[in-house]
Image (cartoon, rainbow, N blue to C red):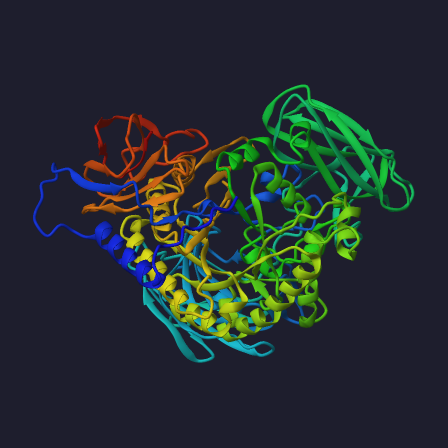
Amino acid sequence: MKTENQKPNTKNRHRLVTQFVAVGLSIYFSVSATAQSADTPVRLTVDTGNPTHNVHPNVYGHFLEHIYHSVNGGLWGELVWNRSFELSSSGSGQWAIEDGTLVQSSLSTDVNFLFGDASWGDYEITLQARKERGAEGFIVLFRARDKDNFYWLNLGGWGNTRHAIEKEVNRRRGVIGAGRDGRIETGRWHDIRIRCEGNRIQCWLDGQQVIDLRDANNPFLTGMIGLGTWGTHARYRNLQVKNLDGSTELFSGLPKLPAEVFQVDFWTHFGSGKAERVRDALNNDFSIELTSDGSPTGIQQGNFRFTRQRYEGAVWMKGSKAPLPEGVRLELLDGDKVLGTTVVGPPSGGWTEHPFQIDSTGNTLAGTLRMTVLGKGPVKLDHVTMMGQDALANGGFRPDLLEAVRGLRPPIIRWPGGCFASVYLWRDAVGPQHQRRIYSAHMWEDQDINSFGTDEYMKLCRQTGAEPLVVINTGLLQAGCGAPGQFRLASDDDYLPYALDWLEYCNGDASTPMGALRAANGHPEPYNVVYWEIDNETWGAGVEAYIRIVKQFAPAMRAKAEQLGTPIKLIACGGNGFDMQWNRALIDACAPLFDYISIHHYENPRNFGSAIARYERLLVELAEYIAKSANPAMEIYNSEWNAQSTDWRTGLYAGGLLNAYERQGRKFTLGGPALFLRHTSAGAWDNAFINFDHTGWFAAPNYVVMKLWWDNFAPRFLPVAGNQRGANLVATRSEDGDMVVLKAVNPEDRAMTVEVDLQGDFTPRTASLQVVAPGSLNARNTLAAPTAVHPKSGVVHLTEKRIRFDLPAHSAAVIRVN
């Protein structure tokens, strides 16, 4: 689905591009030199007969990352969370006391626990800490009211680059104060001191003060203390808490460990028997061993939506020792009411799959899956799976979320990340589900079970009409967004052949080794993936290190593609935000090696109107630099963009930025916002297009506006002349010439009347208007009110070749002229 850009009718292409961009920007962003009444219409002229370039459909692309249960627990229709029992007690980590030290050995992120007295006021904390391995340093919590309201000192945070205080208020966390650069050394003891006096916080590391700040914004003045880590294995000792003059010792020694109870994420134990997470597994590290004394005992998981349909799944079981129980009863419950039941088993001496079918006789939004041991004795359970017939009939996808994705008609979908891609091992996520290994890292409040891999992604692309775009792991980064990968290939030199194998798995025929593997997995025909991105957000490694990766990977991937007879397009990681220094260095060093430069930008929603001009100027600067480079054919890809909100501001930002992309469509040809999907239980990144829980979903305003824009897409970009006076309007014409589309955003807090004169060979006969104007910047959709922000029909006046319409304050509109 590629539309070739129309070539300018000039020998000096760069000069024409620069002149058009400069004129377009000055018209769009200029402020009238003479005072004009707010009632004076914005008067513009559109030249319908001289399109300047074609807008590529891939501008309206999307990006699917495994983040906050977007896939695992979301789009992919597997209903059971933590099916292999690998996740245990999220946030509490793996704590132990060894030789007088408190040890946290898990490499999970956001690990911490609290202790002490919530009434403690001013105090001083001293302790020692040692890093054993991992991505970052130490976390010491203080003035903690509860687990959702506290300060913490983050030493060696942000990839072991900075020290800072973060404050969490009702699960929203952010840095306060300036912080300072610094790192934590591995294998040595560090001295830490924290002093809390009123709203003043002072911190020292190894005798040097690193923090001195006052919190003037509703400070916490009392609270508990705590210890934690982020992607790091660490030890703590010699912990003391005293009042400020040292006369009273509030705490000394080591805290009690988090309660030794059954802690397996999303599962609970019931009954008088025993439930234990043990290291004897079918496909990963852990299983659950249930031991019954004859009375009912088992495990259960809640938050299911059950409907009147059949559910199919399987449980893997293994007998531990005699006597063996008779089996396991599975029940679908609505409270105490049984909606459906079946029995599987008995277990044998080795791991055995026990398929099941359960017909639900009722509906509930608060269902439970219960598994009860029958008879006496021990049994081990692993890899519990279940899907409804509705998902099975949709190729394994949850039907409502698949329709939500289809509603955006994505022309291309980037996958699997994002940070997720940087420690992703593709071989772990192909083949039979029960043979798949869990994802390498715990990030975004989950450790993905790899139920959705390459073949499932390609199925999604086929079912939504999207072209695939695959991001490879080059091994350059040890962690993804601070979450270290627990599994790595044997050597850094193995990552290139590993990537080439992935290319062959996707594009090789069944006569190639990896093509044969794909065929054995049920997919004999090649996927012929064209777009390949060389890793993601490699900024932490430095541009020189990444340049070496591009020079190593790009020629080898092109050679492999040529061998397979499938042309590919390569994408390299550009800078973050406005980092032209990275972009210039990358382009200067290896421009001929790649086809797209991939840049990222996330915006503060407060800047929903003003940020568009600034970012568009970056696109212009980057396009001009490309035009002078050794590869002037290179194109720009904004592979991650969004405003960090799900209120109406993010809809206004989306419309404005999409207009900027269309204006810069000579060089800007590929886009993809993030996040695509997000479970509403997530504690951060509230900016997703599709927001859901187990009961349903709603579209955020960015979804609403992007869908409106894309549903009215026309590729031939038309010049717009006149002072837009704060509005943001573009015009395009359909390929057959029969339709002109105006897309307009009014980011101002006042209404506007707009008059547009159509010049050229286009003769309008009818016009229609759809407008999104919810009346408040705080307006948002929710599960309870999913259409609070939505398009409505408006009034447009057509007089000969003049179009007149009103734009309410803070509105986005599409005018379609036929």
To which quarter of the image does residue 151 belong? bottom left
Q: Is residue 262 above or below residue 600?
A: above
Between 299 and 126, the residue placed more toward the observer is 299
x%, y% of residue 405?
53, 37
Number of marks in picture: 0
Q: Is residue 707 left or right of residue 620?
A: right
To which quarter of the image does residue 499 belong? bottom right
Name the residue rendered at 43%, 51% in the picture.
5
x%, y% of residue 365?
57, 27
To which quarter of the image does residue 324 belong? top right
Between 221 and 754, the residue placed more toward the observer is 754
Name the residue rendered at 72%, 38% in the picture.
385
Q: Is residue 316 left or right of residue 730?
A: right
Q: Is residue 764 left or right of residue 125?
A: left
Q: Is residue 585 visible?
A: yes
Q: Quadrant of the C terminus?
A: top left
x%, y% of residue 328?
80, 34
Name the residue rendered at 90%, 41% in the picture.
348
Q: Is residue 262 visible?
A: no
Q: Is residue 413 above or below residue 707?
A: below
x%, y% of residue 417?
56, 54
Between 81 and 492, the residue placed more toward the observer is 492
Between 277 and 747, the residue placed more toward the observer is 747
